[in-house]
Amino acid sequence: MTPPPARRRRAGANGAAPAHNYPRRGAIRRAQAITTYGVGSLIAVDQESFIVSGLDDAERSWSRYESPRIYERRLARVLDVDYFRLPPASDDTSKDGLRVRRFPLMHSCPVCNDLQRHRDFNPPTGRSVCGTCEEDLVPSRFVVACEAGHLGEFPYWQWVHRSTDRGAATAGQCGGKLKMRTTGRTSSLRSILVSCTCGQAPEVSMEGSFRRQALKDLGLTCRGTRPWLGSSAPTQGCSLPLRTLQRGSSAVWQPVLKSALSIPPWSNRREDPLAEHWDALRTYDKREHVEIYLKGVFKEKPCPVPLEEVMALLAAENAEEPDSESAPTPEHRYRLLRNMEYERLRSGNEESERSRDEQFVCETPLGDQAVLRPLGVTGPMLVKKLREVRALKAFTRLVDAESTTDSGEVPLAERPLRWLPAMEVRGEGVFLRLDEDRLGGWEKSVAVAARIERMRTAHQRVLEQRADDPSRVVPSPATPRMVLLHTLSHILINEWSLEAGYPAAALRERLYATDEMAGVLVYTATSDSAGSLGGLVAQGEPETLDRTVRSAVRRAEWCSSDPLCMETEASGAGGINLAACHACVMLPETSCEHNNILLDRALLVGTPEDPRLGYFGAVLGR
């Protein structure tokens, strides 16, 4: 990572801009630039704190060699971009990388207790130390944010002088200097004391600064500051209420991620040369018009993609178009994307019929699938090769990324981008479905519906509390089959981590749970060689899968936290889970699509009072 360039740079030879060679401030993995330390997030490096800069200048500064383009047409259409780029993988000879800016600017010195902006300490070049004490400076632990995604410095001056007659508009005009010290008596906010040398205000603690109305009581509202965009981003009025947050809080930054599997006919990479022309090609509905356009684009060279394949690709795009006449929402398009994946996973894609460049190979196992019928499981498929593209669409602050609409998402740049940062993962997996007839009868159970209604109500309440606009909150996805499939995938991942030798964090779930779909794909989620060794695919053979499901269900029957876990009325944040805890079904959050919520193993195994509640109750022989 590197800091942003100065506004005015010295010209190089012949008036050209010199090669970038900014000081390095740390290193992160490519995947972290999407999931943990993306644009707008705060990152701690040694004793310093930085915010990851926006992408307005990335198209020019990111090296094409270190940050190549990747294509996934189906996902690009949903997100309305042309292509994706891998975050830069810099080495010792790189001139540039992921850029960062110092934030927060307010620092304190643990020796002289001064609390002021970083530059006012007069630190030596390239170091973050007090110019007087030679002691490492401590970045402010506190920042403020609003639900529109703006981020700012904590108003220490107003906090100290809140008991005086000075208003917020006269901040810093008392002539004094701020001081911060810690008594060390407790680890609470009461032990952090802030004062001003002007003598007009008493020394106050930070206790109470996290109250929802704390900053509103001071007459402070958001000013629209966006430090990740730097000085080029104008300060715009916002006026939303501000909240105090710890600098390392997860509420400061939450990514909005979207992903797609590469499925035929888009999975052989032959269409990449046409990536910039699909929008234009879609305007033609006749074969001869498409042919004329391609001849005009490639002129004397032949089109690298045969015309028959181009027409097949255009037909595949039209198949994912919504049937309604009204303009489809991005969420509607994303659901259609999942529908096409589900149909392709059901139908398969034999390796013997495809080229070596094929990135999606899905085959029917050779064993007798009848052994799975008593379990209510059907249609297992061995996904021997797959490619997933995960893109960072935007981010949110304070509000949950799952509860907000597009209007509450913060873009990655000041100007609209025609590309997004993304990661591609190659691996293998096992796909299975639940028997629709048996599932339909189970869903109609009054006891099942009652448990799901409790979870749905609790989840909807949490979504409304976290949403930026409660009137536009997204509906909870909790349904009987969704919770059942979600919990089933968790116990399968736990079982395969024991049987197949994969760590649970190396496996990932992908749920297909609507009125028309009832399937789950468990696949390797790592980009290294562990993702394609064949160990997971081997678990999808019917005889092996039968033993795995039976073992996983029996293991889920008992939790070390029982009877508390099974008999609880609500568990997890906001009471969204029921019989689910870290001792039984919860997974590393990188493996779960829903952040370990909407889980209930009672829907798998039943309860002591009602064994028929469980979909797999018959497996337990009760």
Image: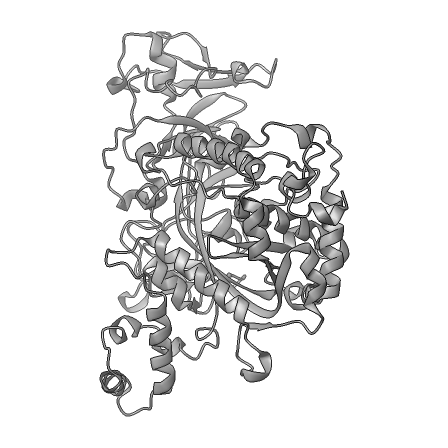
Depth order, front residue of 462/294: 462
- Let me know if residue 324 appears in the view: yes
Q: Residue at x 29, y 75 (%)?
A: 277
Up the image or down, 465 lies above or below 356; here it is above
Asked if residue 134 shows in the view, the reply is no
Q: Where is residue 286 in the image (x, y as percent from the top left)?
A: 24, 82
- The number of numbered badges drawn on the structure is 0
x, y percentage for residue 411?
33, 48
The image shows residue 147, relative to residue 320, as above or below, that is: above
x, y percent for residue 287: 27, 84
User: 71 above or below 5?
Assistant: below
> 436 or 571: nearer the eye?
436
Which residue sits at x=70%, y=53%? 503
* In the image: residue 279, left or right of residue 484: left
* Along the line of sight, the residue nearer the viewer: 543 or 537: 543
Question: In the shown orientation, is residue 90 left or right of residue 532?
Answer: left
Quarter of the view holding residue 303? bottom left
Residue visible at 68% across and 55% down in the picture? 375
> On the picture, is 297 further left or further right than 560?
left
